[in-house]
């Protein structure tokens, strides 16, 4: 018996991958929460999946065999010994633009006291489990894709492990943004999130300068623990004066750990960083580092006329909803989880469109830059004004140098 | 059945019996949605704030 026939007799069924779910954003889609792959479907294909979550291999019509083969290649369909029970997908009409990503500050508490933290001060404030369930339910109902568990340090939430237990019951991908220092080997194994982003802000001396003595070794141990159990890990690095010479060493270290996504940013002048601006580096230096070392992918592509945050909003630790954790002045509040709820808050939020950016109208780079970040524009004096950082990037010679 | 394009975009026109035994022509289309590059095609870095959102704000 050839290997295909042997495989077919051992696994006579093809089933819809339990990590994949049918959703409806701007279009019908399949989302795989394990690998973050999103597939756009037409209506016929949506119907096909609603009717066929299990296929018996020996009765697959010739006409769709190649299609089925593609679905197998993409791990949308999996070999199975037995058929599965049909799953129910609630395909609600979503708001447009869709709310795909949600950042939650689970708690403001943190075990570190970093020089650049924007969330400071370190308060004993956290979202209750009931509210968290409500948020996840609402996000799922809204056809959302990803929930980013942040803070503070998410692991400092007093009931984090109870939250962790309910994660697998949702058709949502969970990504945790952590300082990594508390992730023991046992914890890494227990974590039900699909992805962990760990902050590494330099090699030992410069990282500890920013985050406190001993934090580097603990964070690296955290990464090792996560990698040992096969968890997907990315790294986020803030550029500061002490670490600008470390990037080659960091690259070597991250390559060794198989880190595919390395986000490199520059801290913004808020929170504790305001008192530490003498450790900031010039923008030109930061750009060079980001271009040379940064890697990885961003959100799923989408075309909207919004400036930033087309598909994301934030729930703070007190339950208030904002466009992003930086745009959190009371007049920009979108409501609260308890009163407005996520759907109403998102539906009523109009965002800022590219057409509203009076100062950018004549800019030749507007189509590419899309206006950049509204928080930086606001800090610069006008929320509908220019984002000085993106202006600097697009208008510098480095743009031409790198576009050639 | 016609396969129009390989790679991440697949389109098929197929005769297929739906539930109830009804046979009709259906157009099966599936496309993997690409992700934004952290470094746009022009290699201009998407400089973000320290916002920890994994760049999902799209800036």
Image (cartoon, coloured by chain):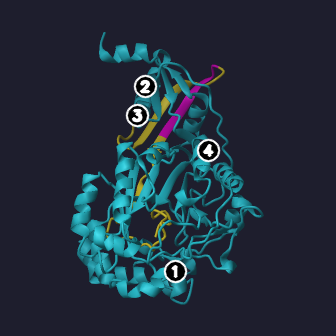
Residue ID for mark 1? A271
As measured in the structure, the alpha-carbon distance from the residue carrying label 1 to the one carrying label 2 is: 57 Å
- CB atoms at circles 4 and 3 under 8 Å apart? no
Quarter holding the N terminus of chain A?
top left
Please name the residue shown 57% across and 70% down the image.
A324
Q: Nearer the viewer, mark 3 or mark 2?
A: 3
Q: Is residue A304 visible?
A: yes
* SS state under label 3: helix
Q: Are marks 4 and 2 on the same chain?
A: yes
Residue ID for mark 4? A166
Q: Is residue A149 visible?
A: no
Quarter holding the C terminus of chain A?
bottom left
- Of label 1 and label 2, which has the lower sequence position? 2
- Of label 4 and label 3, which has the lower sequence position? 3
Whether residue B53 is situated above or below residue A69 in the rendered picture: below
As measured in the structure, the alpha-carbon distance from the residue carrying label 3 to the one carrying label 1 is: 49 Å
Crowding at label 4, few (<14), some or many (≥20) Cα neighbours within 10 Å?
A: few
Residue range of the region highlighted in magenta in the rendering: B21-29
Q: Nearer the viewer, mark 1 or mark 2?
A: 1
> Who's yellow, chain-wise?
B
Image location (x, y in percent) of residue A229: 39, 42
Image location (x, y in percent) of residue B21: 63, 19
- Of label 3 and label 2, which has the lower sequence position? 2
Residue ID for mark 2? A65
Image location (x, y in percent) of residue A260: 33, 54
Crowding at label 1, few (<14), some or many (≥20) Cα neighbours within 10 Å?
A: some
Query: What colour has chain A?
Result: cyan
Residue ID for mark 3? A70
Residue sitting at the far top: A1
The chain that hosts pointer 1 is: A
């Amino acid at each position: 018996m050839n290997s295909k026939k042997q495989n077919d007799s051992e696994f006579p069924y093809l089933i819809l991958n339990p990590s994949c779910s049918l959703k409806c954003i701007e279009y019908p889609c399949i989302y795989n929460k394990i690998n973050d792959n999103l597939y756009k479907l037409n209506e016929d294909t949506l119907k096909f999946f609603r009717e066929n979550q299990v296929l018996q291999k020996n009765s697959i019509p010739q006409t769709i065999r190649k299609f089925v083969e593609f679905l197998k290649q993409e791990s949308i369909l999996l070999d199975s010994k037995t058929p599965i029970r049909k799953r129910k997908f609630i395909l609600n009409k979503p708001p447009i633009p869709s709310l795909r990503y949600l950042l939650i500050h689970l708690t403001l508490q943190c075990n570190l006291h970093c020089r650049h933290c924007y969330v400071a001060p370190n308060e004993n404030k956290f979202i209750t489990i009931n509210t968290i369930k409500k948020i996840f339910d609402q996000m799922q109902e809204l056809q959302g894709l990803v929930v980013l568990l942040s803070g503070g340090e998410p692991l400092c939430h007093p009931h984090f492990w109870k939250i962790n237990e309910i994660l697998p019951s949702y058709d949502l991908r969970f990504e945790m943004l952590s300082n990594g220092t508390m992730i023991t080997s046992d914890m890494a194994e227990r974590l039900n999130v699909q992805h962990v982003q760990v902050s590494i802000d330099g090699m030992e001396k410069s990282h500890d300068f920013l985050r406190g003595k001993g934090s580097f070794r603990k964070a690296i141990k955290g990464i090792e623990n996560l990698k040992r159990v096969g968890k997907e890990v990315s790294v986020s690095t803030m550029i500061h004066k002490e670490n600008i010479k470390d990037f080659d060493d960091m690259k070597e270290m991250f390559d060794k750990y198989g880190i595919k996504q390395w986000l490199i940013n520059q801290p913004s002048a808020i929170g504790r960083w305001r008192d530490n601006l003498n450790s900031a580096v010039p923008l030109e230096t930061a750009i060079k580092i980001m271009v040379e070392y940064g890697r990885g992918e961003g959100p799923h592509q989408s075309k909207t006329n919004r400036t930033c945050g087309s598909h994301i909003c934030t729930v703070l630790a007190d339950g208030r909803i904002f466009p992003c954790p930086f745009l959190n002045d009371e007049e920009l509040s979108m409501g609260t989880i308890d009163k407005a709820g996520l759907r109403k808050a998102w539906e009523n939020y109009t965002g800022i469109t590219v057409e509203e950016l009076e100062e950018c109208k004549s800019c030749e780079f507007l189509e590419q830059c899309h206006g950049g970040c509204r928080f930086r524009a606001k800090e610069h004096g006008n929320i509908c004004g220019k984002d000085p950082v993106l202006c600097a990037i697009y208008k510098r010679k480095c743009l031409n140098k790198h576009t050639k | 059945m016609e396969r129009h394009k390989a790679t991440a975009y697949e389109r098929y026109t197929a005769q297929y019996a739906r539930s109830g035994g009804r046979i009709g022509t259906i157009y099966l289309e599936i496309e993997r949605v690409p992700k934004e590059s952290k470094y746009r095609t022009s290699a201009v870095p998407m400089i973000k704030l320290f916002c920890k959102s994994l760049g999902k704000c799209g800036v």
